[in-house]
């Protein structure tokens, strides 16, 4: 019998019964998986995971009638090298987001088939291997040279905090600052608003690149992207929710990888949904602008995401926290916010809701509408900082989120409408 190669070591944590049996049978009949342990309690999970050293761990949402959300949080922090996949009740989308924030890299709704189980595990495995490969490449580039920003993802776990407005205006500022090819990519696959913000309608969208994802040619991209009057290139998300639902992380990563060869800078509006596609876009970026507003719920969600990001093994300085609507009436004070995050903010964005709303309703971005306004000038200053920012500079800072050439207090345009 030929020796198994590249087997993925998997541990199962679930109550005894049909679900546990179904997972056990599925994993023991596949040559690319090795079942290294089956637990029906969390009492000795730490010891068993440390001893068995699995690459993946399947964990049910309830064990012994107790929820496992806190256990996932703790285990993911203790074992960042292990990818955790949660088993969830059908349709529990809120719980799905909670387990992802807790550190899981994927989830499977019950009831499931063996085919569904195995395909999910393989997809999570491939994403994790690709992410680690990308991380190794990035770290190697630090040793060779310091390179400027290439891909920037703008994300927040809280909706309505202004990721789309920030991404749009920042892309325009990068274009003016560098006079290079800049692409604004709508990674917010469901209910994206970039077309409204730029007063554009697209005959083609990101979905039209999916069939060509693994062999992306510049001629195809040229037919799909839109060119704004400012010369900014825009790739809008799909208009059909059914089409958006069918976009897989592997294809999305390949598209971004192909686009980075054609553009000097790519700004991705990731939005606020935490999903495999969102994590894939953040994996593909050199930096993630993590957007918060001075409201307790938003700060809580951002703090949890910062904790979750540790399980992604991102290099120091990849996540740059931006406070939007700083100084808003009734907002949490800056000093209290930094205590919650346990690190300094990379930038603060003053509250200017009236101008944001006016520019949004006109379909003309704030950076173009109020070009001489101090807020727009501050956006340009942030763009300058990001252009100068490199992985090498961040490494020299020793893990601080504030690079050597940028100090706390960078001001941006308020982006109160997502």
Image (spheres, rainbow, N blue to C red):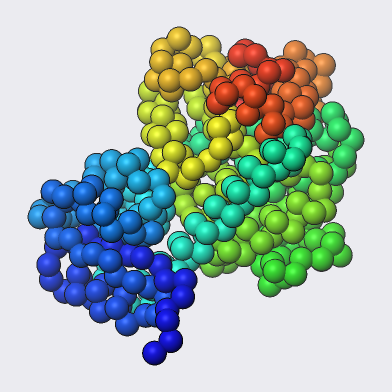
Residue 257 in picture, x, y percent from top left: 70, 56
- In this rendered view, identify the residue nearer to me: 61 or 135: 135
Does residue 91 sit above or below 279 in this rendering? below
Q: Quadrant of the N terminus?
A: bottom left
Residue 204 to residue 364: above or below: below
Q: Residue furthest left?
A: 64
In this rendering, would 14 be left or right of 367? left
Is residue 300 visible in the rendered image? The answer is: yes
Q: Residue at x 39, y 20 (%)?
A: 340
Q: Quadrant of residue 153?
A: top right
Q: Residue at x 59, y 35 (%)?
A: 318
Residue 114 appears left or right of 195: left
Q: In the shown orientation, is residue 353 left or right of residue 274?
A: right
If the image is split into quadrants, where does the C terminus sit? Answer: top right
Residue 378: x and y in percent read 73, 18
Who is closer to the viewer here, 186 or 289?
A: 289
Q: Can you give x and y, in whole percent of width and height, for residue 53 in the image?
A: 33, 56
Q: Is residue 47 above or below residue 417?
A: below
Percent coordinates x, y for residue 387 in the rendering: 77, 30
Q: Farthest residue in the bottom direction? A: 1
Where, by quadrant of the figure, is residue 406 drawn? top right
Q: Which residue is found at the position 69% from the left and 38% from the top?
A: 142
């Amino acid at each position: 019998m030929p020796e198994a190669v590249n087997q993925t070591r998997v541990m199962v944590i679930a109550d005894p019964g049909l679900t546990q049996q179904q997972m056990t049978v599925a994993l023991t009949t596949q040559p690319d998986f090795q079942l290294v342990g089956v637990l029906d309690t969390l009492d000795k999970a730490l010891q068993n995971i440390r001893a068995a050293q699995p690459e993946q761990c399947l964990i049910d949402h309830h064990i012994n009638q107790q929820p496992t959300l806190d256990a996932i949080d703790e285990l993911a922090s203790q074992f960042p090298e292990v990818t955790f996949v949660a088993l969830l009740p059908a349709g529990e989308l809120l719980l799905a987001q909670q387990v992802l924030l807790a550190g899981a890299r994927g989830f499977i709704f019950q009831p499931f088939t063996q085919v569904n189980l195995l395909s999910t595990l393989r997809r999570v495995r491939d994403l994790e291997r690709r992410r680690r490969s990308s991380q190794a490449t990035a770290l190697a580039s630090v040793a060779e040279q310091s390179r400027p920003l290439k891909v920037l993802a703008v994300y927040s776990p809280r909706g309505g905090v202004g990721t789309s407005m920030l991404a749009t205006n920042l892309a325009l500022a990068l274009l003016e600052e560098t006079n290079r090819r800049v692409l604004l990519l709508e990674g917010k696959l469901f209910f994206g608003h970039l077309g409204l913000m730029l007063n554009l309608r697209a005959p083609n969208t990101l979905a039209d690149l999916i069939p060509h994802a693994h062999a992306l040619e510049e001629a195809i991209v040229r037919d799909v992207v839109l060119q704004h009057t400012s010369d900014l290139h825009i790739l809008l998300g799909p208009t059909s929710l059914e089409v958006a639902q069918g976009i897989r992380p592997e294809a999305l990563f390949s598209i971004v990888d192909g686009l980075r060869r054609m553009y000097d800078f790519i700004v991705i509006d990731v939005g606020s949904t935490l999903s495999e596609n969102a994590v894939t876009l953040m994996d593909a970026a050199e930096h993630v602008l993590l957007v918060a507003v001075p409201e307790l719920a938003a700060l809580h969600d951002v703090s949890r995401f910062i904790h979750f990001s540790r399980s992604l093994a991102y290099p120091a300085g990849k996540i740059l926290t931006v406070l939007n609507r700083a100084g808003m009436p009734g907002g949490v004070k800056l000093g209290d916010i930094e205590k919650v995050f346990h690190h300094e903010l990379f930038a603060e964005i003053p509250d200017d809701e009236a101008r944001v709303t006016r520019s949004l309703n006109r379909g003309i971005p704030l950076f173009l509408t109020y070009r001489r306004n101090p807020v727009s000038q501050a956006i340009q200053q942030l763009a300058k900082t990001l252009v100068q920012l490199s992985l090498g500079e961040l490494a020299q800072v020793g893990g601080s989120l504030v690079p050597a050439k940028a100090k706390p207090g960078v001001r941006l345009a308020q982006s109160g409408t997502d």
